Amino acid sequence: MPQIPIGVEKRQLDTPVLCLDLERFEHNLATMAQVVSTAGKAWRPHVKGHKTTAIAWRELGEGAVGITCAKLGEAEVLAAAGIRNILVANVLAGPRKVERAAALCRSCDLILCCDHFAQAEPLAAACRRLGVTCRVLVDINIGMNRTGIRPGRDAVDLGQAIDRLPGLQLMGIMGYEGHLMRVADPVEKAQRVQDAMGILERCRDLFHRGGLRCDIVSAGGTGTLYLTSQCPAVTELQAGGGVFGDPLYTEGMGVTGLVPALTVLATVISRPDLDRAVLDAGRKAVNPDLCLPLVKDHPEARVQSLSAEHAVLQLGPGAQDLRIGDQVELIVGYADFTTPLHDEFYCFRGDRLEAVWPIWARARLQ
């Protein structure tokens, strides 16, 4: 997109374009920071949903102790921007990854996760070759059944093995309760989150009894923010996606206090029927997986379908005055899947463009 001057009205932008409402974003940012602070926890928000240095710095400005990344490539981008305290909440394998991780320890205070000795041993060797030390958390399976070592004796054995490796510094444990984010019944959800965090608490106690360091117990996503923050054993929260107030969280996971801040501005390009409008923003501009986009300011309109380049809206009586050339904002259902489709956030205060934030870690998948 050609460079857009700061201060222009939103209606002057070509479409489709990714728009961030700064007032709503700042509300969500402050809300999440306050929840974590009130609970007496540290905040290490995940950046995988925004991949943007400008937002990471604002999170640190709200009191975050560091950031969490999903991929080493994201961490490299954030470290190059001057951010120091970085957790990659993922396990790494392969000689190229290991060498990059060790090299990254020269420019930031990196924390990596391991759930097997086969990850830890080559990492330690690479760190020794470069004369650096990498901090490590043992990744515990607390029910997600993705990565994570079995809790109990296996986790302690891995912790002890890591603790003996020169080049690594064992710092604690982490677990992710992602399988509980969409539990519908609030009482059941609270109990299951408590049970999952209880697994981490017991592992922490086993680490301590085994003479192992466990300063960090890291967990938490936006969908369980209010629950996980109340679990005594947890020392830091990774929840980060809520800064955009996605409907997936507010409507799909029952998270309160957040408001939708991220939209894709689109244009009506066809009106084939009274009750149907076609927009110029399809799946290449807004991803519908997990949560369909909503139509902002048009409660009687809904997204009927999305193809590669088009969205088809079903229009109720109150939305049938839409005309070809009108602009419509689609509220992004889940930012993690839509942000990587764009190069920049166009940031608005009211209806005026205040900033353009490049999505620097876009496509950093390795």
Image (spheres, helix red, strand yellow):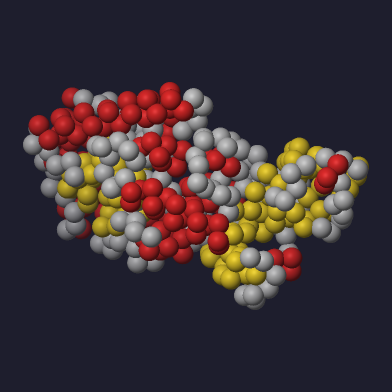
Query: Within the image, what quadrant is residue 351 found in?
Result: bottom right
145 relative position to 3: left or right: left
Total numbered badges shown on the rendered structure = 0
Q: 353 or 358: nearer the eye?
A: 353
* Image x and y of residue 188, in percent: 43, 23
Q: 100 or 158: nearer the eye?
A: 158
- Residue 284 can be seen in this image: no
* Image x and y of residue 113, in percent: 29, 42
Q: Residue at x 26, y 37 (%)?
A: 232
Q: Residue at x 74, y 44 (%)?
A: 299
7 relative position to 194: left or right: right
Query: Within the image, what quadrant is residue 208 found in?
Result: top left
* Image x and y of residue 139, in percent: 29, 36
- Residue 211 can be seen in this image: yes
Q: Residue at x 39, y 33 (%)?
A: 177
Vertical arrangement, residue 164 with respect to residue 129, above or below: above
Vertical arrangement, residue 127 with respect to residue 289, above or below: below
Q: Residue at x 56, y 35 (%)?
A: 252
312 relative position to 97: left or right: right
Q: Considering the image in quadrants, where does the N terminus appear?
A: bottom right
Q: 46 or 105: nearer the eye?
A: 46
Query: Within the image, what quadrant is residue 132 found in?
Result: bottom left
* Image x and y of residue 11, in percent: 74, 65
